[in-house]
Image (tube, rainbow, N blue to C red):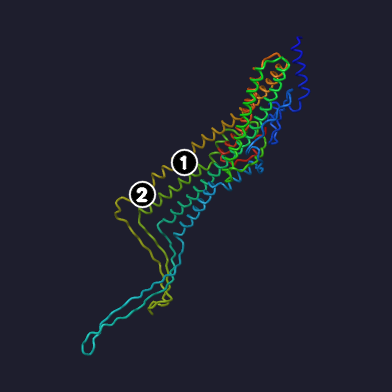
């Protein structure tokens, strides 16, 4: 063995003994400012390679280092459903629609009213004296009555029935719209929540990568000092350290952006910090079948319920148009009592009876028939929209299913790629310590391992987001029990 080779091996052994504890490797639990450890999901952590003590990394700044209130995924969704103004607006629209049914039902409801009439005016007359001289007479008189009137409608040609049906369809549409809004807010909140976790773990990864690059820089400098490496190796590694610092700062800034998006959905201060708690680990694969997803979507999606409500409303509109175009018939019982009147004949009088009116339109310029045809076209349009909604829901549900399956497979693949890249990096570092390779091999392996780690973290939360989207596509509430992103 030549002397330079012996010196490099001895130096590597000495550095390994003196710096094992502080060294941090990609794929190993990396303690970070947030207190979490990044561990390959479903695999044991790989041991850290022998590296010298790292230089102190730049501290986290801004919202990335601020600790906010602990928040679970379910808690975030509940907060959004309670405080998001879009949900509040949809809730009040439902209340208004429900009151519309009560208004429509009053068409055949009994009514009681107190009516009062009064009049004050002058009266004039002319009389003649015994000498036959006309004498004008002017007087001021007041007249009035107070009466209580009650009416009980018995039949109005079906108008009230049609109006109640239309109002009930409006309630169904408003309820579906509320559910649609809630489902949309749930998905947006779940996605934003997972984006926060993704940004935080990406920051942890970037922190570990910076430490890794700094450790390698220290080792490279030691190799140069021992005379077994060129100064250009240090320059190349310094460039990697600088890039790692930039990546870390960018990741920290992404945390603030992700938290602001989540807080906006929660109806909270976008500048406030929050501590997102990691949900449980996701299932290794999508368990539900495509057929079950489609069946659940057709049964639960609010878009279909809303389209069906529009069909019901159009049917009620057609019935009302036919009532308006036909004979107008109304029958009711009415009674009136006049306790007070300036006329003795009307005081304490009581009237009652069964009354009805019939109006037969002879010519309306074609208005009635045009309104019927208009209502029929609206009904056909609503029915076509229902069919379109069913097709769209099926396509969306099936696409969401395929995306979730693909995301699960991608997670498995990126996990394997990460493990392979970590192993390749350890091998190249050992070869460099032994002096049998160049710094280019090490820097290439570092870049590959770094990208593999970033891809793996992204794949974890992409899978979680795909599972949340699948639940949304089935028309089901999003719960953390079936999601998770622990890494």
- From the viewer's perspective, tell me whether residue 416 is left or right of residue 186: right
- List x then y, in percent, for residue 396: 52, 35
Name the spot of residue 104 as percent of width and height, x first.
46, 56
Q: Is residue 264 visible?
A: yes
Residue 374 drawn at (x, y percent): 37, 46
**Visible in this render: residue 413?**
no
Looking at this view, is 56 or 107 the one in front? 56
| Residue corresponding to mark 1 | 386
Toward which corner of the image does residue 136 lie, by quadrant? bottom left
Q: Residue furthest bottom?
A: 130
341 lies above or below 373? below
Return the residue at label 2: 371
| Residue closest to the far top | 2
Q: Residue at x 44, y 54 (%)?
A: 163
In this view, 330 is above or below 242: below
Q: Residue furthest left?
A: 132
Q: From mark 1 to mark 2, how far is it between C-alphas?
A: 22 Å
**Horizontal side of residue 136 vs 260, given as left or right:** left
Q: Residues within 10 Å of mark 2 (few under 14, many from 20)?
A: some
Q: Residue at x 50, y 48 (%)?
A: 174
**The N terminus, quarter of image:** top right
Residue 389 screen position, x and y as percent: 48, 39
Mark 1 nearby-residue class (10 Å; few <14, some 14–19, many ≥20)? many
Q: Residue at x 54, y 45 (%)?
A: 179
């Amino acid at each position: 063995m030549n002397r330079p080779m012996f010196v490099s091996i001895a130096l590597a052994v000495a550095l390994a003994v003196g710096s094992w504890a502080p060294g941090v490797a990609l794929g190993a639990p990396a303690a970070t400012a947030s207190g979490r450890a990044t561990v390959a999901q479903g695999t044991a952590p790989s041991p850290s390679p022998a590296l010298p003590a790292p230089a102190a990394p730049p501290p986290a700044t801004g919202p990335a280092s601020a600790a906010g209130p602990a928040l679970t995924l379910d808690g975030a969704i509940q907060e959004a459903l309670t405080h998001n103004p879009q949900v509040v607006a949809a809730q009040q629209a439902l209340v208004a629609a429900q009151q519309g049914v009560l208004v429509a039902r009053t068409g055949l409801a009994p009514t009681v009213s107190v009516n009062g009439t009064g009049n004050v005016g002058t009266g004039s007359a002319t009389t003649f004296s015994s000498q036959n001289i006309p004498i004008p007479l002017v007087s001021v008189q007041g007249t009035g009555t107070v009466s209580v009137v009650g009416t009980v409608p018995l039949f109005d040609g079906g108008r009230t029935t049609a109006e109640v049906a239309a109002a009930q369809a409006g309630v169904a549409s408003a309820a579906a719209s509320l559910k649609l809004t809630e489902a949309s807010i749930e998905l947006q909140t779940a996605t934003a929540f997972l984006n926060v976790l993704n940004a935080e773990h990406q920051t942890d990864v970037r922190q570990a990568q910076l430490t890794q690059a700094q450790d390698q820089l220290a080792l490279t400098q030691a190799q140069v000092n021992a005379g077994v490496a060129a100064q250009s190796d240090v320059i190349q590694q310094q460039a990697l350290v600088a890039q790692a610092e930039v990546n870390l700062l960018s990741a920290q800034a992404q945390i603030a952006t992700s938290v602001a998006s989540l807080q906006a959905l929660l109806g909270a201060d976008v500048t406030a910090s929050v501590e997102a708690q990691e949900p449980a680990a996701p299932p290794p694969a999508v368990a539900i079948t495509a057929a079950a997803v489609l069946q659940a979507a057709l049964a639960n999606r609010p878009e279909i319920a809303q389209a069906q409500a529009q069909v019901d409303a159009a049917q009620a509109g057609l019935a009302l148009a036919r009532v308006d175009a036909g004979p107008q018939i109304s029958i009711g019982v009415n009674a009136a009592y006049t306790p007070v009147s300036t006329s003795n004949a009307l005081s304490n009088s009581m009237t009652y009876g069964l009354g009805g009116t019939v109006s037969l339109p002879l010519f309306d310029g074609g208005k009635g028939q045009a309104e019927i045809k208009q209502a029929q076209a609206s009904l056909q349009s609503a029915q076509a929209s229902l069919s379109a909604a069913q097709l769209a829901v099926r396509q969306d549900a099936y696409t969401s299913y395929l995306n979730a399956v693909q995301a699960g497979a991608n997670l498995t693949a990126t996990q394997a790629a990460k493990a392979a890249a970590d192993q390749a990096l350890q091998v190249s570092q050992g070869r460099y310590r032994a002096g049998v390779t160049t710094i280019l091999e090490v820097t290439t392996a570092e870049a590959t391992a770094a990208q593999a780690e970033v891809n793996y973290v992204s794949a974890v939360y992409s899978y979680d987001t795909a599972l949340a989207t699948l639940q949304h596509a089935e028309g089901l509430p999003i719960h953390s029990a079936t999601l998770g992103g622990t890494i």
